[in-house]
Image (cartoon, rainbow, N blue to C red):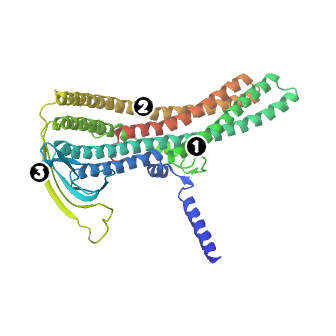
Amino acid sequence: MKNKLITLFSLCLSMVAFAQEVPTSFSLQEAIDYALIHNRTAKNASRDIKMAEEKKWETTATGLPQIDAAVDYQNWLKQQVSLLPAEITGGPPGTFIPVEFSQKQNIGATATLRQLLFDGSYLVGLQASKVYLEISQNAKIKTDLEVRKAVINAYGNVLVTNESLKIIESNRAILESNLIEIQKTYENGLEEEESLEQIKISLSSLISDLNNVKRLKILAHQMLNITLGIDLNSKIILTDNLEMLSLQYTSLEALAADDSVENTIDYLIAENDVESKDLFVKLAMSKGMPTLSAFVNGGYSAFNENFGFTRSDQKWYASSMFGVSLNIPIFSSLGRSAATQQARIDLEKAHETLIDTEQQLKLQISTAKSEYQFAIEDYANKKQNLNLAESIERKNETKFFEGIASSFDLRQAQMQLYQAQQEYLQAMIDIINKKAELDAILNTTQL
């Protein structure tokens, strides 16, 4: 019973420890740090690096000593015979004697040591394995940059839906209060029915928007969870707010960042492609070089009419051999030349791709800076427009209840305010997303 209680207690501790692995709240930076470790795409990119490291050693090992062992057992069901001239035993010329040269059963065990002495393709393979590892490492950096950008976008979308929900609920509360007040005025015969209908239209539209944003909030949370690498329906709390992040991500220094593309990860990946294609050329050329290898082996063999190899009096015969093999390619009907030319063409294409990547990156940097600068300017504009829309809506509401403005004028002012509110939210998230986009393009090997 005591052992069962200990086991149960240990299980409970394990479950608690597992539950504590996933935080319940995240700032944006905490979300980024968590995703870089737990995002499934990032985890697979780390596994690719481990695979590349193992591949590098696999390639290296082919040029190191190789030892193989073999055990062969043979049992003649019908033993093979050879014919010897009968005259060697005094028989008549022209006749033959069937002879069995071996016993019915035999067994042999050998061990062979092989060593590659020279192979051009092996030397190229060592270089290729190093480049392959570098490609995997750069791919991991690229993945981390994309994960970082995805977390920022997903985190911002959740904040936008949260803020949008608050704004729409506040607008609904105000409209419902106005509806009650206008309903009373209408019942007392001091207001037209059209005014009541205009408020109902606005309220109905708001309720529809509210329901839609509630659904979007669930989807935004689920998208963030997937990006973080946690369960789809996990409940997490975001500790940063949208306005604070938009101010944090407003940086004029980013607009003055160096436009050099040589250290950007996309350029480095394109350079890796050129390196790999150059190695393919070297590999194709190495096929025309000689290869040299050596081996030494040793073994024991035993023969018997019956299976008595385990007996102590069984005789075993030792053997050993050393050898060197030199393979010299002479003529391949121009096959190797064709393979080399194909590799050279691929290398030329890789150089063109590198130049194109450089030009595309320069354009992307210019575009990203332009869009980021517009997002900063647009944020200031949308903030000013929101203040004006709030002022206009308040004035029209006052005029309406004083009988100066019509219900149509009030509805127009309200619609303008609602649009300004959403545009202000979008302007804040645009600053965050455009800054993340610019960072992803400019970022080199350091996150």
Circle 2 — which element? helix
Q: How far apart are marks 1 and 2 (CA)?
A: 28 Å
Horizontal relation, residue 388 to residue 345: left or right: right
Horizontal and vertical percent position of residue 377: 45, 33
Evaluate whether residue 345 shows in this view.
yes
Mark 1 nearby-residue class (10 Å; few <14, some 14–19, many ≥20): many
Q: Where is residue 402 in the image (x, y as percent from the top left)?
A: 76, 29
Q: Earlier in the sequence, mark 3 or mark 1?
A: 3
At numbered mark 1, what does the secondary structure look like: helix, strand or loop?
Answer: helix
Label whose residue precedes the other's in the sequence (3 or 2): 3
Q: How crowded is mark 3: few (under 14 residues within 10 Å), some or many (20 or more)?
A: few
- Residue 378, image x, y percentages: 48, 32
Q: Tell whether 383 sits left or right of 390.
A: left
Q: Where is residue 414 in the image (x, y as percent from the top left)?
A: 67, 29
- Cα separation, mark 3 vs mark 2, equals 102 Å
- Crowding at dot 2, Cα within 10 Å, few <14 / some 14-19 / many 20+, comes out as some
Residue at the image point whose x is 28% and y is 59% from the top: 107
The numbered mark at residue 371 is: 2
Residue found farthest to the right: 188
- For badge 3, the amino acid type reads Ile
Q: In this view, does 314 lie above or below 352?
A: below
Residue on which the image places disc 1: 222
In the foreground, 431 or 339: 339
Asked if 306 appears above or below 210 in the picture, the reply is below
**Residue at mark 3:** 88
Left or right for 340, reference 174: left
Q: Which of marks 3 and 2 is in front?
A: 3
Dots 3 and 2: beta carbons under 8 Å? no
Residue nearer the viewer, 17 or 321: 321
